[in-house]
Image (cartoon, grey):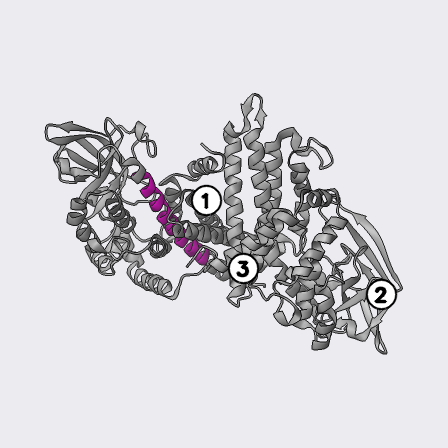
Amino acid sequence: MRYDFTPEQLAWRDELRAFLRKAATPALLAEMRAAGNEGDGPLARAFHEKMFAKGWWGIGWPKEFGGLGKSAIEQFIFVEEMEAAGAPAMRLTITSVAPTILRAGSEEQKQRWLPPILRGELEFAVAYSEAEAGTDLASLKTRAVLDGDTWVINGQKMWNTGAHTATHNWVAVRTEPEAPKHKGISMIIVPMDAAGITVQPLWTWSGIRTNAVFFDNVRVPRDNLIGERGMGFYYAMMALDFERIMIGSVGMLRRFLRELVAFVRRARRDGEPLARIPWVRRALADLEMRVEVGRQIGLLNAWLIDQGAVPTKEGSMAKIYVSELNAHLASVGMEILGLAGQLAPDDPAAPLHGRLQWLYTTAPLQRFGGGTNEIQRIIIAQRGLGLPRK
Amino acid sequence: MWLAPTEEQQAVQQEARRFLTAELVRERRLAWDRTAEGYDPEFWRAVAGLGWLGYGLPTAYGGQGASLLDLGLLVEELGRAVAPLGVFAAIAGGLALAALGSSRQKRIWLPAVARGDRLVTLAVAEAQATANPAAFVTVVRRQRRGLRLDGEKRYVLQGVTADAFLVAARDGRGVSALLVPADAHGVTVAPQRTFGKDRQSIVRFRNVALDADALAGPAGRAWPRFSALRQRLAALLCADMVGGADAVLEMTTRYVCEREQFGVKLGTFQAVQQMVAVMAIDLEGARHATRQALWRRAAERELAIAKAWTGRAYRDVTLNAHQLHGGAGYVVEHDLHRYSARAKEAELRFGSTEEWLVTLGDVVLGR
């Protein structure tokens, strides 16, 4: 047993840090804050290009597809350092779409889609949910019907974040209406410039834009269906498993906590240094503990992946734990900031650039998104601990 | 990074688990509840025969020199079985003497401790002080060529059956460590009744005359070593809690998979599944926070995190287990209450959850 990184892993971490010290500039961070942390401005794009050039967006992919073939622990280190620096997040194209093509796609599909993704030429939005298919994803109704060598798609998708800027959409559609609901779904790649697509903005509490997207007789080539017909639901679940290395990272929370501690060290309230107020000290200690425990659970998840396991239980644990810690740290942190905790990022007096109130408004998404935490706990109970379904 | 026990570590754990499962049968436990030691001589000889009591002691003194992590993995198994606390007390007393004792004391006592022939136990806590030596009422004074000890220690593990006490006593300069034989004139021991029904005692020292060589290490300078020792023992106690919480989660999942109400298994109810999942997350956090603290030899930050988290987690796991077991786990014939009391007692010992959070606050913000 060993609770330390190997010298090689530490060297990888130091390489990342050295790069990020230069690349994650204050100007880039300011641009991202202004964009609600979406990272779509010119500086963020330039950053993404640098990452593509280094091959770092494909760190976990096999080398034959231009990736670096790094282990899950090395990916964990990567995500942690990126978050700790406040750099733009990896996009779903990298974390969900590409790994699924890699696992499920035909050789031809891999050769067609992966190299341009790794060169940064393609950007995907992910279209799973519908108005009547959220947590119960398998009940989705958007249909694709084969007409010769063309799929014809009709229906409506919700929460299709990034659809207004993406080049392609990764769409879950029903292709086998006669099959049981979990077995009738397929994944189809739809270019966003195809005729018949309408994108309507949905603005969320956190300020992030998402979309409702309508498909009206949208036609795409037959080979845009990735992998096997009827396997789409399982591919979507697989993609969520890939995301969990990222979800289980507390890199961002460690940064916010560090900044919160720095604030407490210099601030006073009612004539007393904040750092001398017992409840503030207690609250920060509690956060320090919770963040460290979250890091352990995330590391465990990544480590198990490297051992060849499919850590369903631990992945769900990491998702629940970190999403709930996001909400908790934001709330307690704002309490420590006092009345200033409510100041928005564009108020010049906002401590921590208003990041905690931003986290407070984005945390609910982490809890109900990607499979609600209640569903995750059921997964832990049933698949992890063997509790009965019926 | 390697986050699971190695094959050798697993072998030690499995051997311990097999042994404890075979030994700790219900009738025997009920009989032990009525003894002074909390176990019987056969059990003690068997434990000693396995080498557990010297596992973490230096090889020069008859021990096996196991690392704190290796020792912790063994202690996980003691906790999993809620083994009599006497085993933990003996391991802790041995480590205490190894950390604080003079070479003469170690030469005389440690091999016997490792063999299970002698029991040394730690006597630090008092009625109104556990971690601030300035508040200790136990005082050692120089007297002619020797020493004189007065005062009172409490919550002394296995005090009733110990052969010697390793005592923290205030002197004019600071804190001294003294090895005091239980049969020294002026030493009296009285049992304390705890809800965990383990063997804790009040040990009183009234005008106890000691030779100068009762001093363990230089006079007046023992406190830093007591503090460091306390952190290592706290890490080991965390390991005991992790093993216990694991066992409680296991018995609880088994129960809700078997018990039926309304014509279905309890485990089919989502409310039950949610609770069990929360217990599992608490446990997994405790396991790795604790093992990390053991790996870091009980460094202050990691130990504070482990003790604060694990103390709270084990307590909550046992209380949720009571809720899910209902009456079946509430009767004394069921072992759950042994775990529940052990959990709360462990949360209080070697610094409570809230006390370690204060220390962690000091780590984060400076003292």
The chain carrying label 1 is: B
Q: Are marks 1 and 2 on the same chain?
A: no
A212 horizontally vs B223: left or right: right
Query: Between A18 and A156, which is closer to the camera in this rendering?
Result: A18
Tell me the chief SS of the magenta region.
Answer: helix
Please, what is the three-letter code of the amino acid marked with disc 2?
A: Asn
- Disc 3, disc 1: CB below 8 Å? no
Query: Residue B19's x, y, as percent?
Result: 30, 62
- Disc 1, disc 2: CB below 8 Å? no
| Residue A244 is one of the magenta-drawn residues | no
The chain carrying label 2 is: A
Please tell me how crowded label 3 is: few (under 14), some (14-19), or many (20+) other residues with Cα within 10 Å: many
The chain carrying label 3 is: A
In magenta, the rendered stretch is B226-251
To which quarter of the image does residue A253 belong? Answer: top right
Query: Residue A35's x, y, as percent?
Result: 75, 45
B335 horizontally vs A199: left or right: left
Q: What quarter of the picture does the C terminus of chain B occupy?
A: top left
A273 horizontally vs A356: left or right: left
2 or 3: tag closer to the N-terminus: 3
The structure residue drawn at horizontal position 30% and vertical position 56%, both measured from the top left corner, is B66
Residue under numbered circle 1:
B305
Q: Is residue B303 above or below residue A139?
A: above
Please, what is the three-letter code of the amino acid marked with disc 3?
A: Ile
Q: CA distance from mark 3 to mark 1?
A: 23 Å
Q: CA distance from mark 2 to mark 3?
A: 41 Å
Q: In the rendered image, is residue B300 in sight?
A: yes
Nearer the observer, disc 1 or disc 2? 1
Please tell me how crowded label 1 is: few (under 14), some (14-19), or many (20+) other residues with Cα within 10 Å: many
The mark found on residue A10 in the picture is none
The mark found on residue A73 in the picture is 3
Query: Between B166 and A2, which is closer to the camera in this rendering?
Result: A2
